[in-house]
Structure formats: structure tokens, C-alpha cells
Image: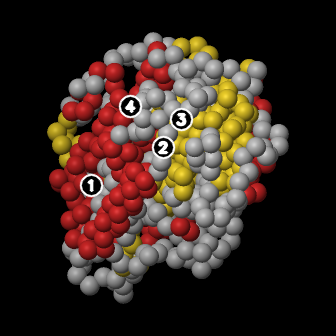
Amino acid sequence: MPATGSKQHRDRILVSIGVAQPEELDELPGVLLAAERMAAWGEQNGYRSVHIHDGPIGKKDNPVTLERIRGEVTAAIKAVHEHSELSRLIIFFAGHGSAIDRRDQYWLLSNWWTDSNEAIKVSGLQRILEFYGPRQVSIIADACQELDAKFMDVIGSAVLLRPKPEEDPEQYELDRFLAADAGLKSFMVKATDDTEAYCLFTEVLLDALEGDAKSAFVNTDKGSCVTSESLYTYLKTEVPLAAGRLNLAMIPRPYPGFLTDKVYLERSSLTALGGGGNKGFAGELRRSRAAPAVELERAGGPRDTDRIEAEKDERDERRRGMLEEAGDAPLPDSFESGCGIALWGIPAVNVSASGARVEPNPHEPEHWHRLWLDTFVDGETWADVVVDLIDGRSAYVCGVAGFISALHVYSEVEAGLLHYRVGRGPPGPEALDLLAKANAGLLDEASLISAAARIRLMKHEILTIGCISAQFYDAVRDVESIRRVASYYCVHRQIVPIDVALLSGGRIHAEGGKLFVDIAPTKRREPRTADERGLPFTYSETKGWQRAPVGGRAPWMRAGWGAVETANYDASAHQWRDAALAVLPHLAPGPFSMVKPDGRDALAALVGITDRSTETQYATAGM
């Protein structure tokens, strides 16, 4: 966009963050150049530019921390709000990253190893920004998305704080341009005698943003421009080509979501800037990405096409393994109590409940447990259950009237939890395969939306499905679809799973030890995929609901805990929120809610379990 307006009166902000030397990870000097050039581009294109980095290399006295980012970003937003609304916020990050799965990514800050909170949880950041009033948000990251075990304890933060607790969130348009897909890495090219180290994705991106890439321009009513959609097409094509010139394979993950002002750069503005390229800051650093003999530096070493294909094979092997485990589990069709838990995998040594009496089933006393709920209303009443495993971890399960909760703990990081109807039999192969693909990271962005639509067909028979589809929608901050999911639970006279409630942006209330959520109505929209087109409930309008009953006092899935920090609370629910936040530091790795041994008491306190049950003690020999 043209660089118009004084520096003090800009309604757009670009935050450029570079973390080149985090604890326990390789130094990435090219990150400093990437962050500098992005900040410079913002400054010259009419943005209020905020540049945060940990340079120079070799000095450790300038760490990038949550507190530092929070202070500078909050100050910039406040400065804009003093004279206008915040029309656009671009947040750029270059550095090391990690991923729990496709639905959640983390950007690692300087002290991430010492403090597991010192990371930016991208989904949380996207949600908290709804309380700061931007009309558009663009998330750009030149960072790996490693699924490495060393990152499993990362908790992360939404960075910003709720400005006014009584305010409701406002939705915004979201663009996301990520250098790497989940499980993959981005590349930094080492310095040579002639060039500084640089980050490959940022170089390709800036070719477009600085006006040097003709293929990134399209004709609009403002003339020839780089837009949200043209940038998507350009990056999908040019990033793999640029990596290929270096005999590498790189798969970016762009997602265009701007609907109103889609323009990032007008060709007419290049004359005012002195032509294509960022000459003011780094013009001398322009270089060809076709150099044949550069070396690569990444945390895990070079990765070629064969290695990427091998990773896909590993993920597919994980998918098949999860399906085999699920297929071998002896799952019951029904319980006399109308509600129960089936456990499989790593043995349990104790099962405790709040709101129900736990009783081992005589047919499979080591694996099946009846739940005699204090009050039984099909689909509407529930109990909190804590399952203590033999390895010291504790899992949370919400037992729902009329449903069997099947918990499969395969390993230290892999688990499955499905709530299926009593009397209907265990979930079929389609549901299990789709969930296994999701947990193995085998769905791309478009597939996530289609998968969310398809699995929503099953959400009233398999309650857990709603939590998973809500997370898919949350990845692209599709709040309207999350609210549709919540609304249809109410239509079917079922509880709204707590994860769905937290992600919906609706106000959370507490009364009598239970939680309730206000669900906003939604308007009809156009279907986005072929799967959606055949499923009208994915795009039809839905009614609003006041104080809809929420199922559970703890999130069902690990990703749901990230929404505790950013959810919309009535004052009555503040005590619950604080108790839930006390559990966060103790979360164990894995897709579903599980805590480390030192977190068992905090989890029990959150859900109202006062002591360990002795009703379900049994020997583990031979299991």
C-alpha cells in the first residue's frame, strides 16, 4: 500500500519478531535479516512498524520474551486506537517453531527451554486478538513446525492479556502464510563470502511484497496489485520452485482469508518507494535464489524430497497403528448404568469421579467401569472422571449420560478418546480412520475444512467429534462454524462439550458447580468445499442460545486448554478459569487431556474430586 500518512497517524501495524538464538537450539542468523527486512517493508508501506529481535548473534542480553512482545504490541495498538480503529495487523515471526499437530503451532522464544510458557501459541494469539478490535489480521511465519518429542512440554501463551474482561470478542478477517506444514521445517541458507545468511521463505515472500515478482500481481479495481489471493497462489508455486533450485523440497501452508481490502501492495506505490525492492534498508542484500552451491543450516539437518516422503510414510504408519489398536480393543455395546468408561492400552490403577459412583464391570473389571450418575438425563447430564495410569499420569474423561467413553492410551504421547452411544456399538471404520488421519497429521488445510464438515455428521453419536471439528475450524479462526457446531448440540438436547464452548467466543457462566455458555446466532453463508455443499448444516443459519449447558469442568482435549486463557468469561466463571489455569503447567504431551504426576491434585481440585477413589484398585500383573 502507498506510504501515506504521518508515522503518528497510521491505522495499520506490522509486528516483526526474530528469535535467532533460543535456548538449546541452533543459532539462525538469517532470522535477524528476515525480521529486519519485514519491519522495513512495513515502515515504507504505511504501517506502524514494531521490530523485536534478539540480535546481534553472540550476545544473550537482548532476549525476546512474552513480556517484551506484550508491552510493545499493546503500546502500538493503544497508539492506533487513540485516533482510529485498527484496520490491519500483520504479525511476522522468524525463528524456530514446533507443532502439536496441524491444529496448533508454537513459535519458540528465547527462554522456551527454561520456561515452557515462553512460546507464542498461534491459535491462542489469534483468539485473543478478537478483543483488540482489528478488522484484519495476517499471520506470517518463517519457522519450522517440528513434531519433535523435545517440544512436547511446550505450553505457550496467547501473549496479550484481555483488555476489558466485560467486552465481547469481535471477529476479523484472517490471512495465514506459513513457511512449513506441520511436521516439516523451513530453510535458512548459510552465509557466503558474498551474502549474509537468509531465510528462504521470507526471501520469496519479499520478492512479492517489494514488487520484484511479476507473477504475484493481479489486476484489481486499484490497478495491478499483490493481494491476499495472489500471494497465496504465488507462494504455493514459487516456494517449492525456490527450494527445488537448491535440490530441496519445501511445502508452504498459505491460507487467504481477507474478504474486504485484499491488497498488500499496489504497483503504483513502487514509484513513491523508489522502484521494486527495499532499497532503504537492504537493497544491497538482494540475491538470486538459484545459487547452486549454498549450504543449509537447520536444527535437524538437511531434508530432501526422499526424507519428506519418508515422514509421510511414518505418519501413515502411525495412522495404521492407531487403527489396529482401536480395532483390537474390546469395547462394550452398553452398560446397565447407561453410562460408563472403557479403558485400553497403558493400565489404569484408579478411577475417581465427581457426580457419579464408579463401579468396575464384572465382565471386564480391569477395563470397563460403570458410571452411576447422580442424575440421569440422556445426553444432558454428566460426571467428571479422573483416570490414574500406572505410569503416574492422570487422564480426564467427561462421562455423559447415554454414552460410553472409550479411552485408549497407546504410548506416552498418543491416545484416543471417543464418546459413543450406548446400544449403538463402537465407532465405525470411517470415523476411526478420519480421526487417525487427523492425529497423524495427514490432512492439509483444505482437507481440514472438508474433514470438519464430514465428521460433524457423527458428532451427535460420537460427542468427541465436535471438539475435533471445532479445533479444525479454530485453526483458520472460523468462529461461525464453531457456533453452528455448538448450536446443533443444543437443538439435539445435548451438552455442549467444554472445548467447543471455550472456542466459540460465547460468554461462559458458572452456577452450582456447572458451566454454561451463550451461543451467538449465525447467518447463512456460501459453502466452501464440495463436502460442505452437500451438507447444508455446515453453512445454514442457526439460532442463538442463552446459558446452554456445558459438558465437563475440564477440556476434553489438550488443545482445548489453550482456549482457557483466551475465552470470554462472565464474572461468575472467573474462579473456574483461575483453577483451570493452575492446571496448565502440568499438562502432559498427547492430543487428549492428561496431566503429569505433579498435576493430579490441581486437576482433581478443578473438577471437584476431593480424594482418590479406592473402588477401582486392581493388580496390574499380566496386563
Disc 1 is placed on an element classified as: helix
Circle 3/circle 2 CB separation < 8 Å: yes
Q: Residue at x 30, y 70 (%)?
A: 310
| Residue type pointed to by label 1 | Leu
Q: CA distance from mark 3 to mark 1?
A: 46 Å
- Which label's residue is closer to the chain start, 1 or 2? 1
Q: CA distance from mark 3 to mark 4?
A: 15 Å
Furthest residue to the right? 610
Question: Where residue 235 is drawn, which disc sits there?
Answer: 1
- Which label's residue is closer to the chain start, 3 or 1? 1
| Residue type pointed to by label 2 | Leu
Foreground mark, 1 or 2, reads 2
Q: Which residue is mark 2?
A: 331
Q: Which residue is mark 4?
A: 458
- Which label's residue is closer to the chain start, 3 or 4? 3
Q: Residue at x 40, y 79 (%)?
A: 301
